[in-house]
Image (cartoon, helix red, strand yellow):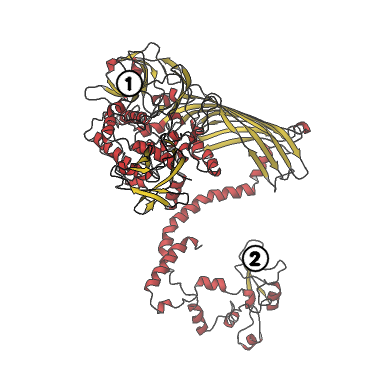
Amino acid sequence: MTYPLAAPRALTLCVLGLFASPAAAQPAPPSAETDAATAPPPALAAESTATEAADDSPAVEAVSSKTSETGDDPVLETASPNEQETTGVPPANSNSPSGDGPTADASPHGHAPADSPDENPDAELPPQDYLSRSQHTPPSPDKARQWEMRPGVPSDEYFLYVPRAILFVPKLVLTVVFLPVEGAALAADRYQVIEHTEDFLYNDARTAAILPVVAAQSGYGLSAGARVFHDDLFGNQEHLELGGRYGGEFSQSYWLAFAADRLARSPLWLEAEGQFDARPRLLFYGIGNRDVESPTAAGQAGRDIAVATRFREERILGAITVGASIKRPNWRSRIGLTGIFNHREFGDEVLAGDEVSIEQIYDTSSLTGFDDGADILDIGPRFVFDSRELSGRPTEGVYLDLFASRAVGLNSPFDRYTALLESFLTRRSTRAMELRRSVPAHNTNALDEVPDSSWFTNRIGVRDISPAEAALGASQAGPPVLPITVTGGKPGGRNPGLMAKDASGRVFVVKFDTKENPELQTSTNTILNRLFWTLGYNVPNDTIFFFKRADVLLGPGARVKDALGNKRSMTDQDVSDILFAAPRSADRSYRATASEFIGGAPKGGWLREGTRDDDPNDVIPHEHRRELRGLRVFASWVNHSDMKQDNSHDSYVDENGKQFLKHYLLDFGGPPATPGRPPTGFEHLFDWSVHTRAFLSLGLWVRPWETIEEMPWPSVGTFSAKNFDPLTWRGMFPYWPYSELDEADAYWAAKLIMRFDRPMLKALVAEGQLSEPNAASYVVETLYERRRIIGKVFLEAVTPLDHFQISERELCMVDLSVKHGLVSSGLVEVLDEQDQVVFDNLVDRRGRLCIPIPATDDYSVYRLRVRRRGKSKPIMQVHFKGGPRARLLGIVRHER
């Protein structure tokens, strides 16, 4: 077989063609293989003509090889030319078992094939000298020399010796490997193993059986068991099945199922299933996009510990379908309602060896559903159409089973794995199929600004914020008052932590850095907490504080889970074990972030789209709120890539005598660029477009993040302005409000970012208390450069005229791109309804410009645009009334 040698042979011929002489380019004589393939069958050699009679050669007898019935040596048989012509005797190397049957191309009646000389006069006949030869009459010496030269050796044959020698060993290995397989197949066929096995396991009607079950699943190991079923329980194809298996990652798995499409010969369609699974040693891969960094297991890096973390899961599943069945002669269909209930309980698991339990790495009280379990109900319609043959084995027809449902969490508003599935597959696909059109944000006012609400409070956008006020942020109450009293484990995060109450009675979540990257999480969390507060978002009181072991007391009610998942009283040793995972400074003190508990009744995180059914004030779909759309620009600035539902928080509060739901941003501890995760900000955790491009390029495409180097400061990571593009920036998870961002939303966010100057950024970064030399100044300059890039991209995408002021005679404005030094000048044009310029003028060095307005009290609309270097920006509108009581009525940032 020459197919594996096609590539080396083609390469050899190409090389030879480059250096071959003209003489070598002549066609090579036919090879032995070619002669053998084109040689006429011996049946044709038996033809006798008048020309043959004139020859001195004796009459030719066709020779065929036939194996005797006793299996002895082949017997030579001869046939006369006439017999061969009528019977179509094949050559000796025919595929026929006996060697004398018709070839594969012969007709079933033994006649010559369609392309034989009798039926096709144009068919090429063998040479005369070939027909004159027989096995008993050697050719003349001249003819012998001609026939010796005719086979020849192809010019590239010698070059195949080496690849054939190389491939000999793999060929031999495959031959040896396949021998047992071929032997087993031969034995199974000869001794009818399958048929006998079925006779043993099935009843005579083949409707019931007891079958072994063996499952080998990647990551779950090998499990074995049995299933018992009956496919015609009551004589109308009712199906009943009972089964179970044990082993591998599944210590137990039992199931019971019943299905009948016409129960008791009625139109009732009923299916029911119950299942119990116990999985004692599953792997927990971490929370969100962050690795676990912990020295709990000696000698293991943080990522290794994350992969080795084990937990157990027990699941009870119940499903029932009730409906009607319609049966016709050639098809049947069913329509009904299906309900699926899933109950899961979780616990930790400690195993032999160096594997660690989940509670040694995480505070499991922070994992949704881990302590209390998770109950999910899935309800929806189901339709089945079946036109297959019902009697015997299905041979043809159509089987269609459609099920549409909506999953509802019965005890939790958020399910992490469902959210991941929606982010990367289900909801992402359905959103793409909705062919959504871009619509403006729904919660802006007439001046195209975001009004104050329970979501957002204008701060730096409407007034001057001092660096000191920005540095204080939401932390007016300050850090915890020492000593702190431990009340339990912390409810969230990747690293070990504590729940504690300070001397003043305030409750905090205490979070630590890792020994591998001291100051990284604590500094990032504190800096971004204050930055987002300055922008206008609601955030908790997060502060960095230092303490020593003597400042940590154990509360009398503190409890902790043991290795078996049972809660017990917490001891001083438990506290010491948690503190052991945290780095210590030279004076043996601990550095931590204290995040004060948010007051009010917690209501979980906010939804990525739609509204909350239990909040009467939540009337604007979240994907159409500008503060959530613009959050993409803010997040790209600081590379906050971990925005998802469980990093937000809704709390029912009572403020100033009013009760309402208040919305918070949480957990900024994900560093701007985590070491070991350079794609942060460049790709989603699973990115269809990027991964497809990398696959098609066979890995040759250099991704932008691959050229970024990690900074020399462990507290900074890979945070950089290099290759930063706010248009292509992506978080680790798709966030639906980000997908709705338009030019007006991006402009609103960018103009707030441009209000952060160097003194304010220095004050914010100083709150991170970075001790490494030059680390703080590097972070400040990186933020400032990324700020400039954002302004250049999003301010220049529209007509960046703002800060409108109107008087009786003129309308004044500021070109923000000129004001912030992004460009040097700009020409402002006023257009009529036909887009003809009726007035234009240049802005001054500060970007200011005033244009005349009508003196009457008429309603007027100015259509404005800015031109730079011959290019015009999109047209915007300013609505106003002039006269003695001139006033601004509204702004349309982007005329559509």
Which SS class for mark 1? loop
Q: Which amino acid does label 2 sit on?
A: Ala
Crowd around label 2: few <14 · some 14–19 · many ≥20 (10 Å): few
Q: What residue type is labelled 1?
A: Gln
Q: Left of 439 or right of it: where is 504?
A: left
**Mark nearer the N terminus (2 vs 1):** 2
The image shows residue 196 at horizontal and vertical percentages of 67, 42
The image shows residue 451 at horizontal and vertical percentages of 43, 30
Where is residue 54, by image quadrant? Answer: bottom right
Please give the residue where the numbered disc 1 appears in the rendered image. Answer: 476
Q: Left of 764 or right of it: where is 487?
A: right
Please give the residue where the numbered disc 2 appears in the rendered image. Answer: 104
The residue at 27%/15% (across/down) is 550
The image shows residue 164 at horizontal and vertical percentages of 44, 61
Which SS class for mark 2? loop
The residue closer to the viewer here, 645 or 161, is 645
Where 894 falls versus 108 (above or below)? above
The image shows residue 119 at horizontal and vertical percentages of 69, 76
Q: Distance between the residues labelled 2 and 1?
A: 94 Å
